[in-house]
Image (tube, grey):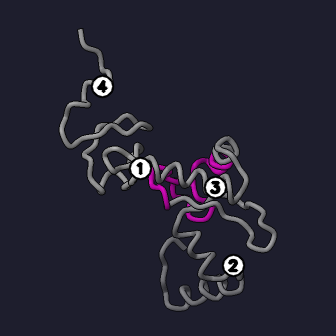
Amino acid sequence: MMGTNKNNNLNKVGYKICLNCNENKPITSNFFYRRKNSSDGFDSWCKECKKRWDKKYHILKTYKINNEEFKKLLDIQNNSCPICRKSLDLRKINMTHIDHCHKSGKIRGLLCHYCNNILNFSKENPFILIKAIKYLKKHNCKNNF
């Protein structure tokens, strides 16, 4: 009786099993990063796993928080952005951001990509944000008011 051993799929020509997620994927630059030192010329982790790892490493290095602290922030916020209340989708790598004060470096919470951009583009200036609200109200933009 054959089990679901990952080695069962190794004979498929043109496919490779990601050593992280164990998924069998085509050996192309769409699924794997190139790596000169590898026997097949591609990394042992698929792009999706590599991006997820890189994001975690970036978070750990830049903000000095680990996965448990990150998950605690998510729990405190009920897995949603505190500004727009949209659910934070962690499967989309660049759509959840750690919001922090650029002066002190203190972490304020987690934001969706769009709300993070609002703060970024306003240069974190509350007066610009207030003026933007007044501008929208003046021009009868009644979305969610």
> Depth check: 11 or 104 in front?
11
The residue type indicated by label 1 comes to: Asn
Secondary element under disc 4, as helix, strand or loop, is helix
Quarter of the image where one finds residue 132: bottom right
> Depth check: 143 or 56 in front?
56
Left or right, residue 126 beside residue 29: right
Secondary element under disc 3, as helix, strand or loop, is helix
Disc 3 or 2, which lies upstream in sequence?
Answer: 3
> Tag count in the figure?
4
Q: Are marks 2 and 1 in contact (CB under 8 Å)?
A: no
The residue type indicated by label 2 comes to: Glu
- Can you identify the residue that label 4 sits on? 7
Camera-side mark, 2 or 4? 4
Alpha carbon of mark 2 to alpha carbon of mark 4: how far?
A: 52 Å
> Depth check: 136 or 38 in front?
38
Alpha carbon of mark 2 to alpha carbon of mark 1: how far?
A: 45 Å
- Can you identify the residue that label 3 sits on? 59
Q: In this rendering, is residue 60 above or below 67? A: below
**What range is drawn magenta here?**
73-94
Disc 2 or 4, which lies upstream in sequence?
Answer: 4
Left or right, residue 87 beside residue 23: right
- Can you identify the residue that label 1 sits on? 37
Alpha carbon of mark 3 to alpha carbon of mark 2: how far?
A: 21 Å
- Please tell me which residue is depicted at 26% across the width and 31% down the height of the picture: 10
Residue 126, how many percent across, how many down? Answer: 71, 81
Quarter of the image where one finds residue 7: top left
- Please tell me which residue is depicted at 59% across the width and 61% down the height of the picture: 97
The residue type indicated by label 3 comes to: Ile
